[in-house]
Image (cartoon, rainbow, N blue to C red):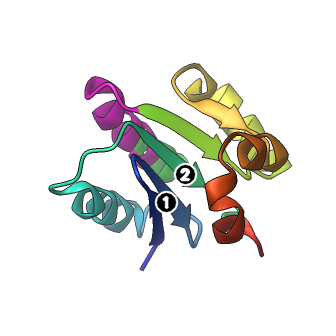
């Protein structure tokens, strides 16, 4: 399992459990799609606190997931990026399609998920 799911009323938080690489990027996207089946959310967040690295396939899977949400008008937030992932997100242009928040900013904005984000 690559994704752990937490939800509040109209907000779903995906806590990604491992690095997303070529060998598991398809699994990541399938879990992502399955988690959304039959559900409607105004906001979706991705917690990358357990992720140390994304290869190009991982970046592609995140872009694909983000595009699917964006096309449905769903607000997308990303949090808990380490320094390297923050650079990868900025270099790949993901920062233009996702709202990237530090952990403190995220918990301040969405306190209902504080417990889910505690290590």
In the rendered structure, the answer to whether residue 12 lies left or right of residue 37 reads right
Does the magenta run of residues contain 79?
A: no
In the rendered structure, the answer to whether residue 32 lies left or right of residue 118 reads left
Q: Nearer the viewer, residue 32 or 22?
A: 32
Of labels 2 and 1, earlier in sequence is 1
Q: Residue at x 41, y 68 (%)?
A: 24
Q: Which residues make up the magenta segment?
A: 61-74
For the image shown, how many numbered marks are present on the structure? 2
Q: CA distance from mark 2 to mark 1?
A: 5 Å
- Residue located beneath label 1 in the image: 14
Q: Are marks 2 and 1 in contact (CB under 8 Å)?
A: yes
Residue occupying the far left of the picture: 38
Can see residue 54?
no
Where residue 103 appears, as percent x and y from the top left, is: 78, 50
Where residue 15 appears, as percent x and y from the top left, is: 55, 64
- Residue located beneath label 2 in the image: 46
Give the prevailing secondary structure in the magenta stretch: helix
Query: Up-down: is 99 above or below 6?
Result: above
Q: Quadrant of residue 115?
A: bottom right
Where residue 68 appears, as percent x and y from the top left, is: 29, 35
Q: Nearer the viewer, residue 64 or 98?
A: 98
Badge 1 local density, few (<14 within 10 Å), some, or many (20+)? many
Q: Quadrant of residue 17?
A: bottom right
Q: In what element is the residue under mark 2?
A: strand
Query: Up-down: is 86 above or below 48?
Result: above
Q: Residue at x 15, y 55 (%)?
A: 38
Does the magenta run of residues contain 71?
A: yes
Say which quadrant the N terminus sits in: bottom left
Q: Nearer the viewer, residue 105 or 26?
A: 105
Q: Residue at x 33, y 68 (%)?
A: 27
């Amino acid at each position: 399992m690559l994704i752990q799911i937490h939800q509040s009323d109209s907000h779903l938080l995906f806590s990604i459990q491992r690095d997303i690489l070529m060998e598991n990027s398809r699994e990541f996207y399938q879990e992502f799609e399955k988690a959304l089946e039959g559900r409607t959310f105004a906001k979706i967040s991705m917690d990358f606190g357990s992720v140390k690295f994304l290869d190009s396939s991982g970046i592609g899977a995140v872009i694909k997931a983000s595009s699917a949400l964006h096309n449905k008008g769903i607000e997308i937030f990303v949090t808990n990026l380490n320094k390297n992932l923050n650079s990868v997100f900025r270099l790949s242009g993901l920062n233009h399609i996702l709202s990237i928040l530090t952990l403190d900013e995220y918990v301040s904005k969405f306190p209902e998920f504080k417990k889910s984000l505690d290590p």
